[in-house]
Image: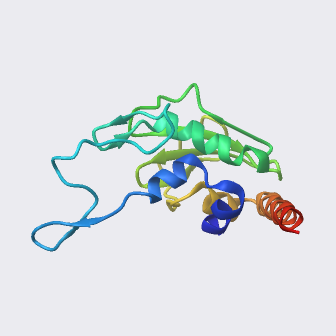
């Protein structure tokens, strides 16, 4: 669904970048993302910082928030939890009024608490590759808003095509 969303709505910058790298094959026939001698250049927005192979998760989190803010009641990057270059925390309130604290790492996004700025170390929740799949699981209201935005975009494309 994220691929369809990206095609019709315009893929979010952080999603485009994470899927736009081309794999190459090295001398041994193994598939690799880039040659070791290549400098690592981010294809993310200009404001995203890449530290070696580690993305600045605080900036990634801001991009995630901006991409789906239209479909939730409230969403912001946590200012009280310590974010680092490899982890950031996002507070989200769904349209149903449920609050979550999300952890964003290279592994993806997962729920780490059931209140803003709360991290429950004992909570062992599944990682999701995209914010879309996570919110789709947590919020029927998100699913509805996402579907409505998709339908509106399709309608605009249809009107422009005739």
Residue 40, position in %: x, y? Answer: 29, 43
Looking at the rendered structure, the number of numbered marks drawn on it comes to 0
Foreground residue among 119 and 93: 93
Q: Residue at x 24, y 41 (%)?
A: 39
Q: Residue 78 appears in which quarter of the rendering? A: top right
Q: Quadrant of the N terminus?
A: bottom right
Q: Height in image: 83 above or below 11?
A: above
Foreground residue among 48 and 99: 48
Q: Quadrant of the C terminus?
A: bottom right
Residue 68, position in %: x, y? Answer: 70, 48
Farthest residue toward the front?
Answer: 162
Q: Residue 144 appears in which quarter of the rendering? A: bottom right
Residue 100, position in %: x, y? Answer: 66, 46
Q: Residue 69 appears in which quarter of the rendering? A: top right
Foreground residue among 114 and 47: 47
Residue 96, position in %: x, y? Answer: 83, 53
Q: Residue at x 46, y 59 (%)?
A: 19
| Relative horizontal placement of residue 113, taking residue 24 as reference (left or right) | right
| Relative horizontal placement of residue 124, taking residue 145 as reference (left or right) | left
| Relative horizontal placement of residue 52, taking residue 149 as reference (left or right) | left
């Amino acid at each position: 669904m994220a691929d369809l969303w990206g095609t019709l709505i315009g893929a979010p910058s952080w999603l485009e970048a994470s899927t736009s790298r081309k794999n190459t094959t090295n001398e041994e026939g193994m598939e690799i993302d880039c040659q070791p001698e290549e400098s690592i250049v981010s294809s993310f927005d200009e404001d995203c910082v890449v530290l070696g192979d580690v993305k600045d998760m605080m900036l990634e989190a801001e991009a995630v928030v901006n991409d789906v803010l239209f479909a939730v009641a409230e969403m912001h990057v946590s200012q009280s939890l310590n974010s680092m270059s490899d982890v950031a925390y996002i507070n989200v309130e769904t349209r149903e009024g449920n609050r979550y604290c999300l952890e964003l790492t290279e592994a993806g996004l997962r729920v780490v608490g059931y209140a803003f700025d709360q991290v429950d170390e004992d909570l062992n929740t599944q990682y999701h590759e995209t914010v879309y799949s996570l919110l789709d699981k947590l919020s029927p209201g998100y699913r509805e808003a996402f579907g409505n935005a998709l339908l509106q975009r399709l309608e605009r494309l249809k009107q422009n095509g005739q």
